[in-house]
Image (tube, helix red, strand yellow):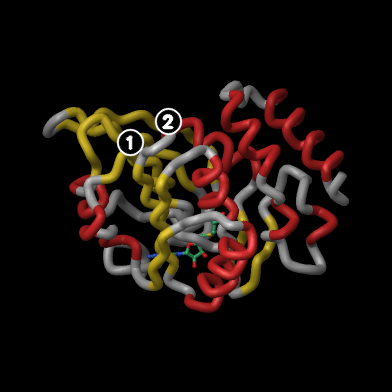
Amino acid sequence: MGRFDEERSEMIGLLRDRLITDEKILRAMGTVERHLFVPEPFTNRSYEDNALPIGKGQTISQPYTVAFMTQALGVRPGDRILEIGTGSGYQASVLSVLGAHVFSIERDLDLLAAARKMFDRLGYRIATKGGDGTVGWNEFAPFNGIIVTAGAPDVPAPLTKQLADGAKLVIPVGDRKSQALLVLTRQGEELIRREIEGFKFVPLIGKMGWQ
Ligand code: SAH
């Protein structure tokens, strides 16, 4: 038994209560040890349903948000998934445990180094790159899903271009204070759009993001 096993299973109960129904996601989030991605002095609060500071003015997303976005993305084992905003590495780890081939981009090289260290320690095989993710990662496109974990002023065009047919782009779009979560599904040349209000992310900073 790990130190936080009980807290983690309580968190899963909470996600169920909040209508996260995908058992594979609940199982993956029951496996990944979120407390390893949360720095001191916040480690003891790792299994509360809150975003927490990870340094450099950034945050690890709230567990509910991770579960909701992952569910919206519709991940299947073997999918190639691009994440923009590695941050702590927690969301990427959940996707990896779900059986996705994860490609993750982070602009802050210190955060990226810490996340990579944790991936190695836990044996998660995740491809990472330091830099501006708003232009995507063309070398490995098309992706079966793209998830952006920082809030954008608009949908970056390069990301929609790197979606495979039938794939989804999940991205918070709005002003700097609050965003709606957009779920865009590529169908041939068309993008089908669904929108869920009421999210709050740190800003996506880059060429196709905030300045
Ligand atoms: N998915 C992360 C959440 C991190 S918060 C987790 O599970 O912990 C969002 C992250 O996006 C921050 O680390 C921030 O540095 C990064 N970010 C912001 N703009 C970016 C950009 N244009 N390209 C790549 N990363 C970016």
In what element is the residue under mark 1?
strand
Find numbered disc 2 in the image and state the secondary structure of the residue it sits on: loop
Image coordinates of residue 149 in percent, x first then y, are 47, 52
- Name the residue that disc number 1 marks: 168
Residue positioned 58% across, 57% down in the render: 123
Height in image: 173 above or below 12?
below
Identify the residue at the far front of this view: 123
**Residue 133 falls in image quadrant:** bottom left
Quadrant showing the N terminus: top right
Residue 144 pos. (x, y %): 31, 39
Q: Which mark is residue 26?
A: none
Marks 2 & 1, CB-CB < 8 Å contact: yes
Q: How far apart in space, not on screen, are marks 2 and 1 (Cα)?
A: 8 Å
Mark nearer the N terminus (2 vs 1): 2
Mark 1 Cα-neighbour bin, 10 Å: few <14, some 14–19, many ≥20? many
Q: Is residue 141 left or right of residue 145?
A: left
Residue neighbourhood size for the residue with mark 2, other residues' Cα within 10 Å, grouped as few (<14), some (14–19), many (≥20):
some
* Vertical side of 138 occupied by 12: above or below: above
**Residue 190, position as x, y percentages in the image:** 16, 31
Q: Is residue 84 above or below residue 107?
A: above
> Which residue has dot 2 on it?
74
Give the percent coordinates (x, y) of residue 100.
43, 42
